[in-house]
């Protein structure tokens, strides 16, 4: 019987590591949590800050118009309507804006899944009763996910809050067919696209009533840069969480204006998507997906680790850890920090009753040997845990 061949290591992305200020002594395999800002984008933001400090009056008087210009550039890159798009700070803010705009009555329910991000789900829970669908992480494909979600609907389900790509398990949930079927049943759809801009070729979920996504993860934008996309039927109902002098303009301008805030990250954000295009968007996406797949293949050879089904095109992969490992948020955080301290490796460890999981990401600054270092050291760590 022929032994299985070893995974083939993808080549390094030319010039990738040199575009970032990351500590080279640390294996940064967790791009999906916080992202990393390339040097050209940092330099653009620093120039904008210098401009703001040189003449604050001129800078802030021009902010609404310049944000509209930056938003139009980003909308063109993402293939969406700039009039239905607004800059926001993060996905959690997007969830709160969405749920504040959706009319809900007593007894109405919001459907969520147990793969959702905690603070985003909390935004739904502030407005209505939440019904949580358990998605088995071993569900084989998008159709199985869709059938599980649809089976959980009740006559009281008014809204479905779904991940575009789930954070812990790194797979597509809010596929176009599921969104279409929910809409046909009169269910308002809110999609958490935190991971899609910059990673997927079509990052804005077509057919969603509300979609929000971070640019500061895979879009190479400065921290605190995200987007909210709203379908035409709901735009008039969207209100800023805090009132401003721009409220009379309505969405998106009223949502974006925050008085004397730091707008430089938003204004520099188009440069991140521009950089991806200059590097070759298809090449970046293919490289990142291949690296994540390589890391997952190496980890899958470790006894006790179980690879989970994945969605093609996603530059993240997850595996289940052995039973009894990372069963609580506290245990997962402790394992994450111990791996960072002992191995100088950053990964996501996520909690799950019966055994948590580990997620690795691929980015142009990563190298195959970083995943090899993790795979070589993790078995001894798990034995000692």
Image (cartoon, helix red, strand yellow):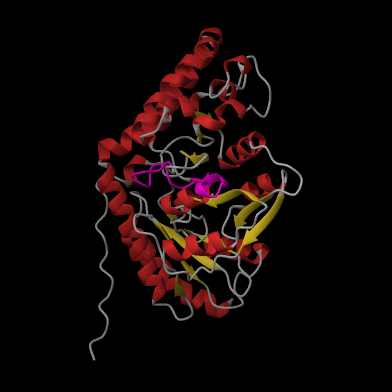
Magenta range is 183-204
Q: Is residue 239 left or right of residue 17?
A: right
Q: Is residue 140 left or right of residue 33?
A: left
Give the answer, above or below, for where 142 lies relative to 19: below
Residue 321 highlighted magenta (yes or no): no
Q: Main secondary structure of the magenta part?
A: loop
| Residue 164 visible in image | no
Q: Quadrant of residue 11?
A: bottom left
Give the answer, above or below, for where 250 lies relative to 13: above
Give the answer, above or below, for where 277 lies relative to 82: below
Q: Image quadrant for the N terminus? A: bottom left
Q: Residue furthest bottom?
A: 1
- Residue found at x 72% / y 43%: 127
Between 96 and 270, the residue placed more toward the observer is 96
Residue 52, given in percent of the width and then of the height, sits at 51, 15
Between 384 and 331, the residue placed more toward the observer is 331
Q: Quadrant of residue 273?
A: top left
Between 159 and 53, the residue placed more toward the observer is 159
| Residue 310 visible in image | yes
Residue 66, given in percent of the width and then of the height, sits at 45, 17
- Residue found at x 39% / y 77%: 301
Residue 192 highlighted magenta (yes or no): yes
Residue 377, given in percent of the width and then of the height, sits at 45, 72
Residue 121, given in percent of the width and then of the height, sits at 64, 50
Q: Image quadrant for the C terminus? A: bottom right
């Amino acid at each position: 019987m022929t032994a299985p061949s070893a995974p083939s290591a993808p080549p390094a992305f030319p010039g990738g590591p040199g575009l970032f200020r990351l500590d080279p002594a640390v294996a940064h395999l967790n791009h999906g949590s916080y992202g990393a800002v390339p040097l050209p984008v940092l330099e653009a933001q620093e120039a904008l800050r210098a401009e703001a400090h040189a003449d604050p009056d001129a800078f802030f008087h021009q902010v609404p118009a310049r944000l509209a210009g930056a938003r139009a550039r980003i909308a063109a890159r993402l293939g969406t309507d700039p009039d239905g798009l607004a800059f926001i700070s993060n996905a959690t803010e997007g969830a709160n804006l969405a749920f504040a705009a959706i009319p809900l009555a007593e007894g109405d329910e919001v459907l969520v899944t147990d793969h959702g991000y905690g603070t985003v789900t909390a935004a739904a829970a502030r407005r209505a009763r939440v019904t949580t669908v358990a998605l088995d992480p071993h569900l084989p494909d998008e159709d199985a996910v869709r059938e599980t979600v649809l089976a959980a609907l009740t006559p009281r389900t008014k809204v479905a809050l779904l991940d575009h790509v789930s954070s812990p398990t790194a797979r597509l949930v809010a596929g176009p067919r599921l969104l279409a079927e929910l809409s046909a049943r009169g269910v308002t759809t809110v999609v958490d696209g935190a991971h899609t801009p910059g990673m997927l070729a079509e990052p804005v979920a077509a057919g969603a009533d509300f979609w929000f996504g971070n640019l500061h993860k895979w879009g190479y934008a400065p921290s605190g840069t995200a987007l909210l996309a709203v379908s035409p039927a709901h735009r008039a109902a969207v209100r800023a969480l805090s009132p401003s002098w721009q409220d009379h303009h309505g969405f998106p301008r009223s949502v974006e204006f925050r008085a004397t805030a730091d707008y430089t990250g938003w204004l520099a954000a188009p440069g991140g998507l521009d950089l991806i295009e200059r590097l070759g968007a298809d090449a970046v996406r293919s490289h990142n997906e291949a690296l994540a797949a390589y890391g997952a293949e190496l980890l899958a050879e470790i006894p006790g680790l179980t690879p989970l089904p994945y969605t093609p095109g996603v530059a993240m992969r997850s595996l289940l850890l052995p039973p009894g490992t990372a069963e609580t948020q506290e245990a997962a955080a402790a394992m994450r920090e111990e791996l960072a301290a002992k191995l100088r490796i950053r990964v996501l460890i996520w909690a799950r009753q019966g055994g948590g999981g580990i997620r690795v990401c691929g980015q142009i600054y990563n190298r195959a040997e970083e995943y090899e270092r993790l795979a070589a050291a993790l078995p001894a760590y798990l034995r000692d845990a």
